[in-house]
Image: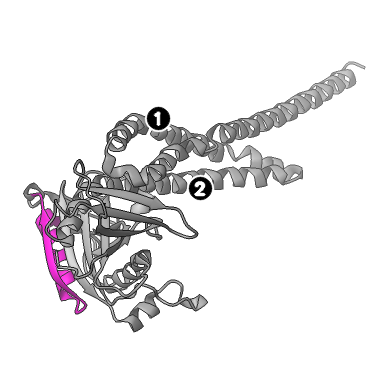
Amino acid sequence: MPTVRTPVISFAVGSFFFAPDGPFPYDFTGRDHMNRIRAALEHLANVNEVELEYSPEFDDKQMILTEALPVIGERLDYSPSPTYMTLDFRLDLPMRLQQELSPWRFVGQPVDTKTEHFHVSIRQKFHASVAFITLIDPGRSPSPSTAVAILREFLTKAFADTEHLRFDCLGPSPFHADFFIRPSRQADEERPFTCLRTTREGYDRITYRYNGADFDTIDEARDHIFDAIDNAFDFVYHLQQVEAHDLVQFDEITDLVTLLVELEKEKGLTGFWKRFRSTSVRSDALMKLADFEAEQVYRQVPTMRTYRQITRQEDAACILSDIDELTQRPMRWPVEQTERLLQLFERRRSSALQNIVTSIAGLVGVGIGALLTALFT
């Protein structure tokens, strides 16, 4: 990792991932995929100092894709990927290009990274892919989180036409904080570093202060801190991926329920006929709802096991509030209300059908009675 010659290190956290892509079918090995990532990055004029390490058993893994993988916000893993991987590279972006790439250029907001040089460290361990983006020698009062959005835009465009490789990002926003590393004013003999989170308008500020007696340089302290906190961020992005996936899944259920609501509003024989034929829509919605609820239940045990492991680590103290919020969000899905609404639609449909059958039976009975009266009088 390159040396950052400043008394304070500024960095941001995101989730970057390089996925295999078309043309299809694509038959490849883990080694093929890793080599393509390295080669594609080294081919970019803005990128240098590429370093890639990963678990060697991934080399011989054989894979085949017949269609594009969903983006990582619509699935529950970061596959294919090795069990362990670190990818480091330096990226140089002129300020003019940063301004062109900035998502806030349309509102006239200037870029506030205060540097043209970045170091990216992408780490994959257990659940997700975590990117630490360090600003190299920035000016005064930088906003590191801005770099996540700008680098995301650059890498998305840079890999848009790359064969068998696609850049992906979970978000689109970075982790909602700006991060800083600086030496501690008072040495803590028990811990190599401490963290302090300051709540403020916009993104919070999280500062890691390291014990100067434990590290020869600030760069050595940075490497240690990244190694210590990447597990916690791995879990955070896993939870965010689950939430994004659940949102897509529940949107599909909501679309079906909305269709049923619109059918309920239709009047007359045409409306009845459409509702009568909507049994498959209700069945599909109920099945998707059951699958959705089952996934929630199955995930609870491993999620809470990891939660207890992570929250016992002092290194995760500054982001515990984010982890707590993410672990509680799955309980907010209106599963029971949606199920009751679908059951109501089915009861209304069955009741309407029963009324029509009764009416038809009555009419048939009257007709038969009239016919018998005519025959015997």
Check if mark 2's residue and mark 1's residue have beta carbons within 8 Å: no
Q: As rendered, which of 302 and 121 lies closer to the eye?
A: 121
Q: What stretch is highlighted in magenta?
A: 28-55
Categorize mark 2 by other alpha carbons within 10 Å: few (<14), some (14-19), many (20+).
few
Image height check: is 195 above or below 50? above
Residue 122 appears in which quarter of the rendering? bottom left
Check residue 241 for magenta coloring: no
Task: Say left or right for 112 vs 106.
Answer: left
Spatial CA span between label 2 and label 1: 19 Å
Mark 1: amino acid: Val
Where residue 61 appears, as percent x and y from the top left, is: 11, 49
Residue 346: % across, % down: 62, 31
Q: In this picture, is 317 found above or below 183?
A: above
Tell me which numbered mark, 2 or 1, is placed earlier along the sequence: 2
Q: Determine the secondary structure under disc 1.
A: helix
Residue 251: give its label: 2
How many residues crowd around disc 1 within 10 Å: few (fewer than 14), some, or many (20 or more)?
few
Q: Is residue 202 left or right of residue 71?
A: right
Residue found 50% across the figure and 59% down from its top:
201
Give me the disc on residue 225: none
Residue of label 1:
297
The furthest residue to the right: 377
x and y percentages locating residue 193 in the rendered image: 23, 49
Label 2 amino acid?
Answer: Asp
Q: Position of residue 318 (x, y in %)?
A: 35, 47
